Image (cartoon, rainbow, N blue to C red):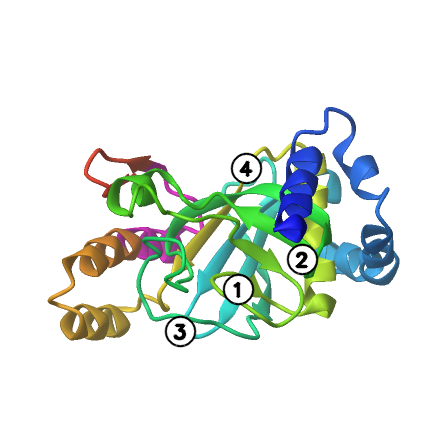
Amino acid sequence: MKKLIILLTTLLFVSFYPGNFKDEQRRYSRVRTAYSEKEAGIKKLLQINSIQIENLRIYMRVFKYEKELELWAKNKDDTSFKLLKTYDICRTCGALGPKRQQGDRQIPEGFYHIDAFNPASSYYLSMRINYPNKSDKILGVSSNLGGNICIHGACVTIGCLPITDEQIKELYIFCVESKDKGQENIPVTVYPARLTDTNYGNLTTKYASEQDKVNLWTDLKVAYDDYIMTKRLPTITFLDNGRHAIN
């Protein structure tokens, strides 16, 4: 319990610090180490893709079945994103489908964004997604939703997305840079799998009796197909019944 309180305090402190975000992050030794080891490679990768670090905007897609996290990026005024890198998720838990309550060991699925950074995490470095989102609050167990779902280092999980200490150093710096350069929300879409027509058909057939899953995957499929075509982020509206309007 004491460790959890310390973790939450750090998350909130860093998330709402009113000064320069990057400077505040660099007060922490792990962030300084990450910059020392990864900054040159990050700048080179951005240069290869004609992306200026001062205009950096990023987006992440997560695929639970494949255990992959994709990092996409663009310049602020570009219309479409480019795939920069794919990180391996080193461990997962639970089954395919959304998280509906604390303790179900599920990794959430749906439309999220990064809402806090923890440079002193128990899992080296971590970034929290905003689970429960509006849909989760409508469809989940309202009195017991849980929270603190993070992308982090190490290789353990009870609902989070671990990518090892070495990989989180780089991804964390990408996120710090984009936030420092004015990106208010870093979107993260978590899919059960790559929703190709074949995979979507297999999933919705296998889980046909579980309407909650099928409804979510149907909404995610619309977003998946749109992004494959345009490489642009659709506008997501959360509906009163927990579903999504995607435009």
Q: Of the residues under marks 2 and 1, which one precedes in the sequence?
A: 1
Disc 3 element: loop
Disc 1 element: strand
Question: Height in image: 125 above or below 147?
Answer: below
Disc 2 element: helix
Q: Dot 1: within a 10 Å radius of its alpha carbon, few (fewer than 14), some, or many (20 or more) residues?
A: many
| Residue 86 within the magenta-colored segment of the rendering | no
Q: Which residues are magenta?
A: 222-236
Q: Are marks 1 and 4 in contact (CB under 8 Å)?
A: no
Question: Height in image: 192 above or below 81?
Answer: below
| Residue matched to label 3 | 65
Q: Are marks 1 and 3 in contact (CB under 8 Å)?
A: no
Tell me, for residue 171, which label it has, or none.
2
Q: CA distance from mark 1 to mark 3?
A: 11 Å
| Residue matched to label 4 | 185
Query: Where in the figure is residue 128, as x and y percent of width and height?
Result: 57, 48
Classify residue 51 as left or right of residue 40. left
Q: Dot 3: within a 10 Å radius of its alpha carbon, few (fewer than 14), some, or many (20 or more) residues?
A: few
Tell me, for residue 69, which label it has, or none.
1
Q: Of the residues under marks 4 and 2, which one precedes in the sequence?
A: 2
Q: Of the residues under marks 3 and 2, which one precedes in the sequence?
A: 3
Q: CA distance from mark 4 to mark 3?
A: 25 Å
Q: Are marks 2 and 1 in contact (CB under 8 Å)?
A: yes
